[in-house]
Image (cartoon, rainbow, N blue to C red):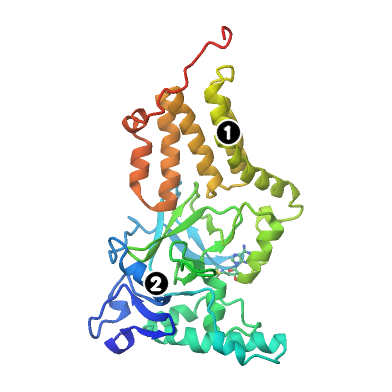
Amino acid sequence: MNEDTQADFTFNDLVYTTLPPDFTPDVKLSDDPNGWTQCLLRRPVLNDILSTPGFPSAPQFPIELCFRIGPSKNGLGMFATRDLSMGDHILTERPLMVTPTCISMPNFARRLAGKTDSQRSAEILNEWEKRFLRPCFMRMDPEAQAAFLDLANSHTQDGSGPILGIIRTNGFEVANVVDPEPNGEYAAVCKIMCRINHSCSPSADRLFDIPSFSFQLRATRSIKEGEEIFVSYCDVLEPAADRQEYLESYGIVCICNPCLPDTTASDQRRLALRESINAIDDDFEEWLSDPLLADDYTIKISQRWIAVIKQEALEASDAYRHHLHAIVRAYVALGDAENAVRYGRLLGLWALGQSGKEDMLRKMQSLEYLQGREDWGMRVCVDHMDA
Ligand SMILES: C[S@@+](CC[C@H](N)C(=O)[O-])C[C@H]1O[C@@H](n2cnc3c(N)ncnc32)[C@H](O)[C@@H]1O
């Protein structure tokens, strides 16, 4: 890549840029094993990224290769090549491209007056491709362009150009790169991570680390050698019909287990699970202040919900974190060292899977930390027969 194609250029408030910045002449994308990302960003977002503490830093890679990409029920997919446990690091990857999911075109909109809906839609898609996405694509190294064009495209019949079609099929939300204004989300396309298929009971999750400008993929539950690894493209606690509506943008008719008819029982479990989160704090306060309630009152409640989470294979969902935390909090309040550490470790592994950071795991499985909390031993154990 040479300096001409590396230099930033702006279009209205949008900036075409290469991250992390590197202006070394004659350096090719393939010369750096971590690669670069071609980005189209609004100026405030770019400024936020550039001023993030630690940016730019080298990505942290897994110790060994533990997956392969191969044929699946849904085109290519990712498969484990060894047994994996919750929190295990599967992949680190810098995206090929990051672009906004929504672009306002106020001047262009005037040209659409008097056209039919389908004409308007075709012209908007064409403008988006030509004016906004193609310049970003043209900044890529030829190898990156080839890898990008090799990705799946489920939008070949709806008027999307090839670049937009590939972004719509593969784009993963970059959760922590967001404009302050409405519709300010961004989508990232990666060479390897975009081969992972969707499941409404996923086994892995991805997180984006701004300082290294890379995704990390981690297991959210045990995965057996040879098993396909899935992430979720949607909110897994939504009912099946709502999930399906969202998944249509990826060109997916989901056929994973919880989406197979009849979905009523699974929908009810997921809805109840979502609502269970709201009751956790009230149950805990009630338990703390009522010595007549059994010592394991809130623990049993959360354990029952964790059984539902396992039944639906939803360990990746936030509901798992909430219920693990509720159990840790109860054991801490009871001053039960063995169980506080046991569940603290599970909570730490969950957090590792979501954040890629080991410090939470170290903290949550440390008895010293748990005993140092102000709520340690807070609930006075009473003999219920005498109470
Ligand atoms: C991000 S790509 C995943 C990798 C893709 N299978 C490939 O061959 O490159 C998304 C596409 O994979 C397919 N896909 C992924 N998950 C699916 C699922 N649960 N059900 C049906 N199709 C799925 C759809 O064609 C979707 O448009």
Q: Where 10 falls versus 384 (above or below)?
A: below
Question: What residue would you read off at disc 1?
Answer: 282
Q: Earlier in the sequence, mark 1 or mark 2?
A: 2
The spot of residue 131 in percent (x, y) is 50, 88
- Report the disc number at residue 44: 2
**Tag 1 near tag 2, CB within 8 Å:** no
Q: Which residue is drawn at 38% across and 29% down?
A: 374
- Given residues 214 and 310, the one toward you in this image is 214
- Given residues 25 and 373, the one toward you in this image is 373
Where is the C terminus found, in terms of image quarters?
top right
The spot of residue 46 in percent (x, y) is 37, 72
Q: Where 219 falls versus 113 (above or below)?
A: above
* Ligand 1 closer than 8 Å to label 2 CB: no
* Ligand 1 closer than 8 Å to label 1 CB: no
Neighbours of disc 1 within 10 Å: few (<14), some (14-19), many (20+): few
Residue type at mark 2?
Pro
**Quadrant of the image where one finds ligand 1:** bottom right
Where is the N terminus found, in terms of image quarters?
bottom left
The secondary element bearing badge 1 is classed as helix
- Given residues 106 and 63, the one toward you in this image is 106
Cα separation between marks 1 and 2: 40 Å
- Report the disc number at residue 133: none
Q: Which residue is drawn at 63% across and 85% down?
A: 159
Residue type at mark 1?
Asp
